[in-house]
Amino acid sequence: MDIVPLLDWIGEARVGALFGLLTGIVFGVAAQRSRFCLRAATVEFARRRMGASVAVWLLTFSTAMAWVQAASLSGLMRPEDARMMAVTGTWSGAIIGGLMFGVGMVLARGCSGRLLVLAATGNLRSVVSGLIFAVVAQMSLHGWLAPLRDRLARLWTTEGGSNVNLLHALHLPDWFGLALGLALAVLALVVARRNRIGGARLVFASGVGFAVALGWVLTATLSQVAFDPVTVTSATFTGPSANTLMFFLEPNPVLEFDIGLVPGVVIGAFLASWIKGEFRFQGFEDEQNMRRSFTGAALMGFGGMLAGGCAIGAGVSGGSIFVATAWLALFSMWIGAMATDLLVDQRGPMAQPA
């Protein structure tokens, strides 16, 4: 794909933001139509059900892995060029941050990506919770919480100044990632069939995984021809939410992939909900629910920044290129979410709907 004429026309920064916008729109449409949600999947699993949410999450995760690994084998992108693979990883951050994020997404009734999608469909609870998430994420990156995050992240880190590629660490062949993705996709389809999920929802669930691959390929392509250094990344919402917030507050903001990604998700999810007649304004049910959501959003903001990514960034984008700390963070998110559902919702006066 020759993007040099586009670079000459609008410049590298605008191309990066345009690629983020495109990735975000695809993600927003697909996530809204498929009702993709890690929180819902973990709640189903914690309650010993392999339901529709588990099937959708598993199909998204597996197709993202298959698409990304196929792109890697065909030379469209290299996992080792990804920022999360090229920097030092933190095992302690993945464990502590992943657990915090898992707790937070159950309390907030949605991960950061899900809150963004819901906000675009008129859910005012998600709008406010998403803003709290972004503010806490920014505080954890450059503000008052940054020293604590840095201290926890440094407790246990990867060696050699880079993260660990699970495929290489386990001495697995390059094609194993693609084979595993396809095998998990078959498992997801079996679970989907048992739950009688319609074909359209399955296609959109695969579309979320495709959006992750699209982000990797587009930023990798841009990095190869751009004059200035370009971060090879994909869909994630912890850092981008904080960066997008600051973009509108700083006097001299800089365009990049992240700045296009978040508005793209909002546009895509809004259009999808509007076309299907599902856009409607919703608020908090009561004061207790509001406190719960605010606490969950704050935990996700700090936990996601500590873990190196959110349920999408670490759980799907990082998992698709086999970043070891991303897989550990994803596992910790599942544990934190399942424990919170067991201790808070299942034993509470009223279980929250999945």
Image: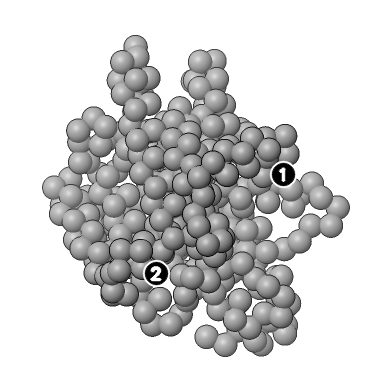
Which color scheme does this rendered protein use? one colour
Q: Horizontal and vertical percent for residue 180?
A: 25, 64
Residue 94 drawn above or below residue 4? above
The amino acid sitting under disc 2 is Val
Q: Residue at x 54, y 65 (%)?
A: 86
* Image mark for residue 338: none
Locate residue 21 relative to residue 253 in the image: left or right. left
Q: Circle 1 is placed at which residue position?
A: 142
Q: Residue at x 73, y 39 (%)?
A: 143
Circle 2 crowding by C-alpha within 10 Å: few under 14, some 14–19, many from 20:
many
Residue 245 in view of the camera: yes
Q: Position of residue 189 (x, y in %)?
A: 19, 57
Taking the spot 39% from the left edge, 33% from the top edge, the residue there is 336
Q: Residue at x 86, y 52 (%)?
A: 251
From this view, report whether residue 307 is shown above or below residue 15.
above
User: Which corner quadrant of the image does residue 195 belong to?
Assistant: top left
Nearer to us in this view, 165 or 69:
165
Instruction: Find residue 134 and report its horizontal and vertical position in percent.
Output: 63, 41
In the picture, the quarter occupied by the C terminus is top left
View extreme (right): residue: 251
Sequence-first disc among 1 and 2? 2
Q: Secondary structure at mark 1?
A: helix
Front tag of 1 and 2: 1
Using the image as rendered, state which of residue 192 and residue 257 is in the foreground. 257
49 lies left or right of 269: left
Disc 1 vs disc 2: Cβ atoms closer than 8 Å?
no
Q: CA distance from mark 1 to mark 2?
A: 31 Å
Q: Mark 2 = which residue?
A: 68
Residue lying farthest to the top in this orientation? 349
- Element under disc 2: helix
Q: Is residue 113 visible?
A: no
